[in-house]
Image (cartoon, helix red, strand yellow):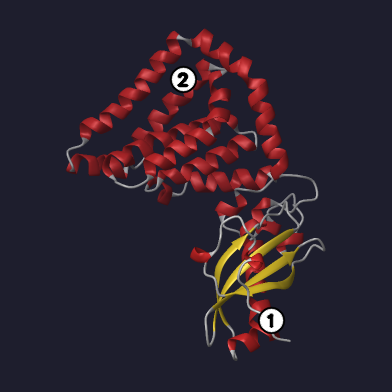
Amino acid sequence: MPMKQTVSSNGSAYAGLPAADRLKSCNPAIAIAAAEELVNDPANLKEPLQLFSPAFALFQNGNKDEAVFWFYAAQLRVRQQIVIENGDRGQLLAIMLMTMGPFINNYAFQNISSFNQTLDRVLAWDKQTVNPFREKARLQKLDQKIDQIYVGFSELKTKLAAEKTSMEAAARQAAPGIEQTYAQMNNQRCRPGQPDPAYENRAKKEEEQLAMDYVTHNSQLIKLAGGTVKTFPAASTIYSYDRSKGRYDFSITGHKPFYAIVDVNRKSGKPEFSLACVTTLSMGYRQVGIDTCQQSTIPLPQ
């Protein structure tokens, strides 16, 4: 199973995994190749939020200057997208800046001259690369708002030039603490003995299918359902490679609808399932913070 797959020095073990999954790999060569594939995918020019994840993967795997480039290229295009498209992209951009920004910006601000050159590269890339938002802005007469985004870039470069010495000193002073936080986060993600995170989505889908198979063929649930068990995943919780246990919550259709709570134990290296309880309480009627199996349950037939 992929959950037992070890990290290979070549890409053969990752064949068939989408680039978005390979991007999570703890193997730098695999993650960097996936990042380069994603930033060069024309589809991501239409949804530039997709450029943030490869930018951070490049940073995690040592290509920090390229990470700064794509982090700011993504910002430039997303800010233009926000001008002409409604939705939650403003909030999503804020999340990206909050989660990735401290690490990438601290690195960038330690060398202002290099950072300025990177910003020039971003502007040159933007000018030479297909921009679906510019044309839409012209049609909607929003050119001035788009222009203000470039003014913001220009103002940033002016500020960097004026405050170069103090900015670099502040960034270098903060660097040890920020780097320690980043190292702890990355070490947790790539702990020795843990499966490569690149397989997380595939393994999760496989485990969920195994859990559904367990429910479908469980004799007690077949009796409760009055025959063939028809099941739909209602929710799954506590799924993580760092945890040896988890729980699935399945919606069952039968004479009467009910929910099967299934525990999974991963200590042996493969998932082992057990039926924890059955309840008629849907999600909206359960008490938050109390184990579902300690609330209203149905006796299991023998």
- Residue 97 in the image: x percent, y percent? 48, 34
Q: Name which residue lies at 46% across and 9% down.
A: 163
Q: CA distance from mark 1 to mark 2?
A: 67 Å
Q: Is residue 84 above or below residue 161?
A: below
Instruction: Answer with mark 1 or mark 2, whichever residue precedes in sequence.
Output: 2
Q: Amino acid at mark 2?
A: Asn
Which residue lies under the disc numbered 2? Answer: 116
Q: Residues within 10 Å of mark 2 (few under 14, many from 20)?
A: some
Q: Going by the image, does 270 lie left or right of 181?
A: right
Question: Residue 108: which quarter of the image?
Answer: top right
Residue pushed farthest bottom? 227
Q: In the image, what residue occupies the spot 60% across and 48% down?
A: 23
The residue located at (42%, 30%) in the rendering is 122
Badge 2 marks a residue whose secondary structure is helix
Of badges 1 and 2, the one in the foreground is: 1
Look at the image and tell me whether residue 217 can be seen.
no
Give the quadrant of the C terminus.
bottom right
* Element on which disc 1 rests: loop
Give the quadrant of the N terminus.
Answer: bottom right
Examine the image and state in which quarter residue 159 appears.
top left
Q: Position of residue 74 (x, y in %)?
A: 43, 37
Give the residue type at disc 1. Leu
Q: Circle 1: is it few (<14), some (14-19), or many (20+) Cα within 10 Å?
A: few
Residue in front for this viewpoint, 107 or 177: 177
Q: Say whether residue 29 is left or right of residue 69.
A: right
Q: Residue at x 41, y 51 (%)?
A: 43
Dots 1, 2 in contact, CB < 8 A: no
Q: Which residue is mark 1?
A: 300
How many numbered circles are shown?
2
Q: Is residue 224 above or below residue 144?
A: below
